[in-house]
Image (cartoon, helix red, strand yellow):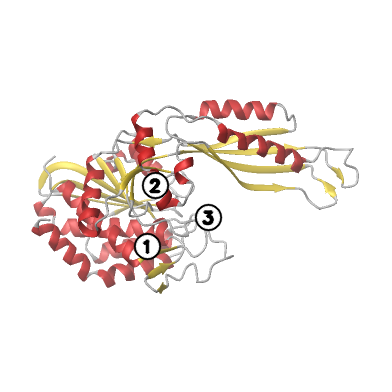
C-alpha cells in the first residue's frame, strides 16, 4: 500500500471518535419513510459540509425531501466518480426494540438505531470520503460528486430518480454506494421489485348469512395463495452470471441468512399489507392488499403480469393495479470499482468480498440503467427493516476505510 493510502488510513484512525459521533447524531435525526420528511437529516448533513467549507447545493422538488449535491474538480483531468447515499430510513414498529430506535446508542461496540446499517453508515462513509478526497484534490484526477438523497425507501420520484432525470450531471462514469452488503460480499446488481395492489369487493352480509355473499377476505386469501405459485417459475438462463452466483452461494447465505442463495435467482412473493372487513360477525365486503414481487435478473414484468391477469380473471370480484416496477439491474461483476473494493478490503481486513446480486433494491440501479457501473459495499444488514437495527463500530469503520481507499484508487488514475 502506497504512502498516500497509508496516510488516509492514519487520518481515519485519528478521526474514529469524530466518525462515530457523527453517525450517532445522524441516526438521531428522525427520517422515517413514510412519511419521508428528511429535513432534519438534511440539515445535519449540510451542517457538516458547511463546517468543512465544502460547497454544496440543495435540490428539493419536494420541500419535505431535500437532496444534497456537492461536486469538486481535481487538479488534473480524468473520469467522474459518483458517491451516492440516502438519508431516509424505514419506519419504526416499536415492538421488539430493546433500545430507543432514534437514540444512536453505543453499546458493546454496536451503534443502535433505525438507519444504523440502512444506510446512514454508508452515507456517512460517502460524506467523509468526499471530505478526505477534497483535501487531496490537487493530487487527483477527474471529478467527484456526492449525492445524499431522500425518498429511497419507497423508490419515490423525489430523490435519486429525480436527480437522474433532471440533473444527469450527477451520474459520472462510475458509482460507489454504501448500502448494507456485509463486508463479505460486494454487490454488482440487484433484483427488480414489482409492487401490485389488489382490490376485492363483494356485497357483504351478516356473519351468519354466509350464503348471501362471498367474503372479500376469503377471496383475497385464495388470490394470495395463487400468487405464491409465481415462485415456482423457473429462473431464466443468464449464462455466466448464473455461474458466478452459484459460486457465491455460500457467501450469500453467510451475508444475508441461510436461504438467500436459493432465492437470488428466483421470483419471490411477499404479501406485505392487507386490510379487510369491518367486524368479526360480518361477511367482509371489501379487502385490499399489496404484494411485493421481486424478479431475478433476466426476467421482466411481462410474464409475471400475464400470470397475475390469469389469476384475477377467475375471480370476478377482484381487480389490481401496478404501483411500481423497477427492472432488475447489473453491471460487470469484475468492474474496475469492484476490483478496488475487493483489493482494499483484503488489504485492511484480510477479506476478499465475493461479487453478488442483491435481493433488495437500491438507488444504484439508476446508474446501471444508464449503463454506468455501480458497486455497492457496506455493513452487515443487521436488524434492517426489523428491530434493534445496528452496525458494529468495526463494520462501520471498515466501510469508511474501503470507500475512502477505493475512491482514491479510482481518482488517482488518469483514466
Viewport quadrant of the N terminus:
bottom left
Distance Cα–Cα, label 2 vs label 3: 37 Å
Indicate left or right for 263 with 408 as reference: right
Residue 19 location in percent, x, y? 29, 67
Residue 207 location in percent, x, y? 87, 47
Answer with mark 1 or mark 2, whichever residue precedes in sequence.
1
Within-10-Å neighbours for mark 3: few <14, some 14–19, many 20+: some
Q: Can residue 150 be seen in this view?
A: no
Indicate left or right for 195 with 23 as reference: right
Q: For residue 217, which quarter of the picture?
A: top right
- Is mark 1 in CB contact (under 8 Å) with mark 3? no
* In this rendering, the label closer to the viewer, 1 or 3: 3
- Is mark 1 in CB contact (under 8 Å) with mark 2? no
Residue 54 location in percent, x, y? 23, 59
Indicate left or right for 407 with 215 as reference: left
Q: In this figure, which residue is indicated by the disc labeled 2?
A: 250
Q: In this figure, which residue is indicated by the disc labeled 1?
A: 43
Task: Determine the residue positioned at 50% across, 56% down.
Answer: 385
Q: What element carries label 2?
A: helix
Q: In this figure, which residue is indicated by the disc labeled 3?
A: 35
Amino acid at each position: 500500500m502506497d504512502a498516500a493510502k497509508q496516510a488516509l488510513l492514519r487520518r481515519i484512525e485519528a478521526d474514529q471518535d469524530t466518525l462515530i459521533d457523527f453517525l450517532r447524531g445522524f441516526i438521531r435525526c428522525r427520517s422515517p419513510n413514510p412519511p419521508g420528511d428528511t429535513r432534519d437529516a438534511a440539515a445535519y448533513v449540510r451542517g457538516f459540509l458547511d463546517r468543512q467549507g465544502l460547497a454544496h447545493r440543495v435540490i428539493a422538488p419536494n420541500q419535505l425531501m431535500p437532496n444534497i449535491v456537492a461536486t469538486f474538480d481535481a487538479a488534473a483531468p480524468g473520469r467522474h466518480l459518483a458517491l451516492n447515499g440516502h438519508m431516509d430510513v424505514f419506519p419504526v414498529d416499536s415492538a421488539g426494540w430493546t433500545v430507543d430506535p432514534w437514540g444512536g446508542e453505543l453499546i458493546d461496540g454496536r451503534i443502535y438505531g433505525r438507519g444504523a446499517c440502512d444506510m446512514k453508515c454508508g452515507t456517512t462513509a460517502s460524506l467523509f470520503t468526499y471530505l478526505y478526497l477534497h483535501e487531496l484534490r490537487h493530487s487527483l484526477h477527474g471529478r467527484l460528486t456526492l449525492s445524499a438523497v431522500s425518498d429511497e425507501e419507497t423508490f419515490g420520484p423525489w430523490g435519486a430518480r429525480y436527480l437522474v432525470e433532471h440533473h444527469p450531471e450527477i451520474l459520472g462514469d462510475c458509482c460507489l454506494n454504501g448500502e448494507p452488503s456485509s463486508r463479505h460480499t460486494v454487490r454488482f446488481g440487484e433484483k427488480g421489485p414489482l409492487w401490485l395492489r389488489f382490490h376485492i369487493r363483494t356485497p357483504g352480509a351478516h356473519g351468519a348469512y354466509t350464503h348471501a355473499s362471498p367474503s372479500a377476505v376469503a377471496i383475497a386469501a385464495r388470490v394470495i395463495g395463487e400468487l405464491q405459485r409465481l415462485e415456482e417459475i423457473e429462473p431464466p438462463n443468464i449464462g455466466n452470471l448464473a455461474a458466478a452466483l452459484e459460486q457465491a452461494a455460500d457467501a450469500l447465505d453467510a451475508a444475508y441468512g441461510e436461504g438467500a442463495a436459493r432465492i437470488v435467482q428466483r421470483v419471490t412473493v411477499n404479501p406485505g399489507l392487507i386490510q379487510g372487513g369491518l367486524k368479526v360477525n360480518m361477511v367482509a365486503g371489501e379487502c385490499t392488499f399489496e404484494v411485493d414481487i421481486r424478479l431475478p435478473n433476466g426476467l421482466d414484468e411481462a410474464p409475471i403480469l400475464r400470470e397475475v391477469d390469469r389469476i384475477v380473471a377467475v375471480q370476478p370480484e377482484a381487480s389490481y393495479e401496478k404501483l411500481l416496477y423497477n427492472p432488475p439491474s447489473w453491471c460487470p461483476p469484475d468492474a474496475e470499482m469492484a476490483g478496488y473494493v475487493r483489493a482494499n478490503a483484503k488489504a485492511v481486513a484480510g477479506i476478499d468480498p465475493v461479487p453478488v446480486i442483491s435481493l433488495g433494491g437500491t438507488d444504484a440501479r439508476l446508474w446501471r440503467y444508464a449503463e454506468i457501473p455501480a458497486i455497492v459495499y457496506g455493513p452487515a444488514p443487521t436488524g434492517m427493516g426489523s428491530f434493534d437495527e445496528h452496525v458494529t463500530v468495526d463494520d462501520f469503520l471498515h466501510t469508511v476505510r474501503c470507500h475512502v481507499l477505493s475512491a482514491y484508487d479510482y481518482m488517482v488514475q488518469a483514466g
